[in-house]
Image (cartoon, grey):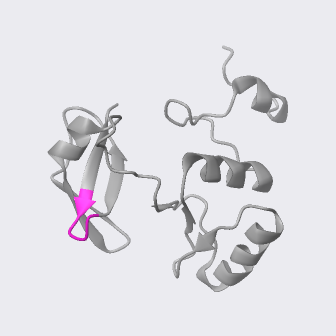
């Protein structure tokens, strides 16, 4: 499935992965509206593409909002300073930051996009059975 780029009124870019035949005109994330940005989508992967990792907030790794300050401190102690917003979502500044955070906290990404998925050989030992085998 392709990755589409949606942009908010303040210029923040948000990637969205979906089928070719069902792309929405706009999406809403954390109360903010993002409109489909054809130019950004067309240039994704080129030098003129927006930097999606400048401030990537991850819903999947969010903590309880009341624990955000503690999570910030723990990330600093583990060597990956990371800010959590008022909703508890961690904000990453680069793919490497996102990868290091997952690594030190023990999170695995098994189905990420190109370059994001963890190496199959590294995580299959953690599974009772190998999901890649029939």
Farthest residue to the front: give it: 47
**Does residue 86 sit above or below 38 in this rendering?**
below
Identified at 32% across, 63% down, the residue is: 12
Q: Is residue 38 left or right of residue 104?
A: left
The image position of residue 76, as x and y in percent, is: 76, 70
Where, by quadrant of the figure, is residue 30 drawn?
A: bottom left
The image position of residue 73, as x and y in percent, is: 75, 77
Q: Nearer the viewer, residue 130 or 52?
A: 52
Residue 86 counted in the magenta span: no
The image position of residue 51, as x and y in percent, is: 39, 51
For the N terminus, give its image quadrant. Answer: top left
**Does residue 116 sit above or below 94 in this rendering?**
above
**Does residue 91 sit above or below 122 in this rendering?**
below
Q: Is residue 1 left or right of residue 83?
A: left
Where, by quadrant of the figure, is residue 62 drawn?
A: bottom right
Where does the magenta region start and end?
7-11
Q: Nearer the viewer, residue 31 or 101?
A: 101
Where, by quadrant of the figure, is residue 3 drawn?
A: top left
Identified at 40% across, 52% down, the residue is: 52
Magenta: main secondary structure equals loop
The answer, for residue 35, to whether it is visible in the render is: yes
Residue 10 counted in the magenta span: yes
Farthest residue to the top: give it: 134
For the C terminus, give its image quadrant. Answer: top right
The image position of residue 7, as x and y in percent, is: 25, 58
The answer, for residue 129, to whether it is visible in the render is: no
């Amino acid at each position: 499935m392709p990755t589409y780029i949606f942009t908010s009124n303040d210029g923040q870019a948000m990637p969205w992965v979906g089928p070719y035949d069902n792309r929405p005109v706009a999406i809403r994330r954390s109360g903010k509206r993002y409109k489909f940005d054809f130019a950004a989508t067309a240039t994704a992967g080129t030098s003129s593409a927006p930097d999606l990792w400048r401030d990537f907030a991850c819903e999947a790794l969010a903590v309880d909002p009341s624990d955000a300050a503690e999570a910030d401190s723990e990330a600093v102690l583990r060597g990956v300073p990371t800010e959590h917003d008022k909703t508890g979502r961690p904000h990453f500044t680069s793919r490497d930051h996102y990868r290091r955070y997952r690594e030190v906290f023990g999170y695995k990404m098994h189905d990420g996009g190109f370059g994001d998925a963890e190496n199959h050989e590294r995580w299959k030992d953690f599974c009772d059975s190998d999901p890649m085998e029939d």
